Image (cartoon, helix red, strand yellow):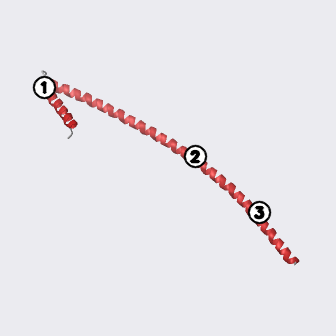
Amino acid sequence: MSKSSNTLLALVLGGAIGAAAGILYAPEKGTKTRKDLSKKAKKEQEKLVKQLKETRESLTDNAQQAKLSFEEKLNSTISTASHKADDVIATLESKLAELRLQNAKLQKDATVEKAKVKTEKALS
């Protein structure tokens, strides 16, 4: 053990021994001392129960706030992703329309070229 743990242990033991000696040599009767100790123990128990209740309520509130914050961030992220997906789809649709126009022009040019070739063969 370290020196600080030994010191702490000595202080706790000293306090316990002092409390026991005080109770044993108290000028009051044993029944009164026990009643007083019982009252003090009940008061401390009530304090502890109250502190536990407050801590539980605080943790519940914090958890609820964290949940709401997470849900808000999640909804925001989903919304942003949805808008970005819409933008990507719109861009792809635009590119597809351009490609269709280019394809139609190429097919038209190919048809015209075939007609020229047929005409040249027919004339020759």
The mark closer to the camera, 1 or 2, is: 2
Pick the quarter of the image with the N terminus.
top left
Task: Establish if 42 lies above or below 102.
Answer: above
Decide if residue 40 is on the left or right side of residue 82. Answer: left
Image disc number at residue 30: 1
Q: Quadrant of the C terminus?
A: bottom right
Q: Helix, strand or loop at disc 2? A: helix
Q: What is the three-letter code of the residue carrying label 3?
A: Lys
Q: Which residue is mark 2?
A: 80
Q: Position of residue 65 (x, y in %)?
A: 45, 38
Counting residues from the N terminus, which is met first, the one under dot 3 or under dot 1?
A: 1
Q: CA distance from mark 3 to mark 2?
A: 38 Å
Q: Quadrant of residue 39?
A: top left
Q: Are marks 1 and 2 in contact (CB under 8 Å)?
A: no
Of 58 and 119, the residue lying toward us = 119
Label 3 close to label 1 by CB (< 8 Å)? no
Q: Position of residue 86 (x, y in %)?
A: 62, 50
Question: Crowding at label 1, few (<14), some or many (≥20) Cα neighbours within 10 Å?
Answer: few
Mark nearer the N terminus (1 vs 2) = 1
Q: Residues within 10 Å of mark 3 (few under 14, many from 20)?
A: few
Residue placed furthest toward the right = 123
Amino acid carrying mark 2 in the image: Thr
Q: Amino acid at mark 1?
A: Gly
- Which residue does the numbered mark 3 point to in the structure image? 105
Q: Residue lying furthest left in this view?
A: 25
- In what element is the residue under mark 3? helix
Residue furthest toward the top? Answer: 27
Query: Element at badge 1?
Result: helix
